[in-house]
Amino acid sequence: MSKSKMTCEEVLEYLVAYLDRETDAQTLTEIEWHLEECRGCFSRAEFERKLKAYLRESGSSRAPERLRTRIKNVIDKF
Amino acid sequence: MRAMIPVSDQEVQDSRVNADLHDFFAEQVTRVADRLYGIALRLTRNGEDAEDVVAETVAKAWTKVGELRDPQTFEAWIQRILTNTFLSEWRHRRASPEVAMEPETDGSEDEPFSLYEKLHQPFLLWWATPEQETIAKLLREDMGRALDALVDAFRIAIVLVDVEGYSYAEAAKLLGVPIGTVRSRLARGRAQLQRALWQHAQDAGLLDQPASPKDKNV
């Protein structure tokens, strides 16, 4: 199998699914080969990956002490 | 002299197992409390509601703790209970689930939008550090706010997939909708999210056209 069979347009079409880990193994491999060799697509993939990481981070917030106390009280009753 | 209550070896052992399970549960819940609260905050968009969802989740989780087969998967296990707790309450609050869920739009907000393409227009190529870092900081800080501003249908799909890390199939199952609906909500929601982030960056004055390169050390 030759490397980088996919064009930039094809990579762009599958990029979201790739970043969401929703492609099949063959597509994933071909995209990774392409990203190794194409700076433009790599840069775009990294940007989208960062946005996803920021989204994930937005789901972590310090639980207020009031909630921690409430949780402790709930668990102490078990 | 008080009568001795006969206690079997089995009962002693059971009580030790229960004490160990209780300690394990308390320790794990303490460990994941910030994550549970953070996800609940994104789902409910309200601090008090988020606290209620987390407290209810903890109480429910204890009643199901016997179903947890692998202690290593505690976080994913309790996160799913939290998501279902929220979704169940959220469905309950809505009189007409799917009608209210899909936003009406004139289509203008549904056009594809790529923040990457916007930020990489030629006139913006000059920005390296520290401007690039400033934009990254802004995107990071604005993400939660921009996400909260989306309609429920899009917001919840994004929280399930991007914040919580569920696959499309898992998100579809949790939401009770076809996988294609999840895909479509994600695509529309992400486009709106990126459009909002772009707008915030513009409003913050970060994307003004710079002086010509000769006036600036690039």
Image (cartoon, coloured by chain):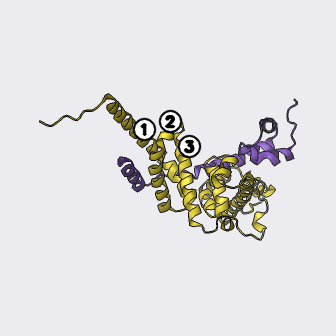
Chain colours: A purple, B yellow
Q: Position of residue B71 (x, y in %)?
A: 50, 36
* Residue beneath the point at 43% across and 41% down: B25
Cα distance between the residues tagged 2 and 1: 9 Å
Q: Earlier in the sequence, mark 1 or mark 3?
A: 1
CB atoms of marks 2 and 1 within 8 Å:
yes
Q: Amino acid at mark 3?
A: Ala
Q: Which residue is mark 3?
A: B76
Q: Amino acid at mark 1?
A: Phe
- Dividing the picture into quarters, in which one does residue B177 lie? bottom right
* Residue beneath the point at 54% across and 47% down: B79
Q: Are marks 1 and 3 on the same chain?
A: yes
Which element type, helix, strand or loop, lies under badge 2? helix
Question: Looking at the rendered structure, which numbered label has been put on residue B191?
Answer: none
- Dividing the picture into quarters, in which one does residue B92 lie? bottom right
Q: Earlier in the sequence, mark 2 or mark 1?
A: 1
Q: Position of residue B162 (x, y in %)?
A: 65, 50
Cα distance between the residues tagged 1 and 3: 16 Å
Q: Is residue B79 visible?
A: yes
Chain letter of the residue beneath label 2 in the structure image: B
* Residue beneath the point at 55% across and 57% down: B86
Q: Which residue is mark 1?
A: B24
Q: Which residue is mark 2?
A: B71
Chain letter of the residue beneath label 1 in the structure image: B
Instruction: Answer with left or right where residue A36 lies relative to residue B142.
Output: right
User: Residue B41 versus residue A71: which sits nearer the camera?
Assistant: A71
Q: Is residue B89 above or below residue A50?
A: below
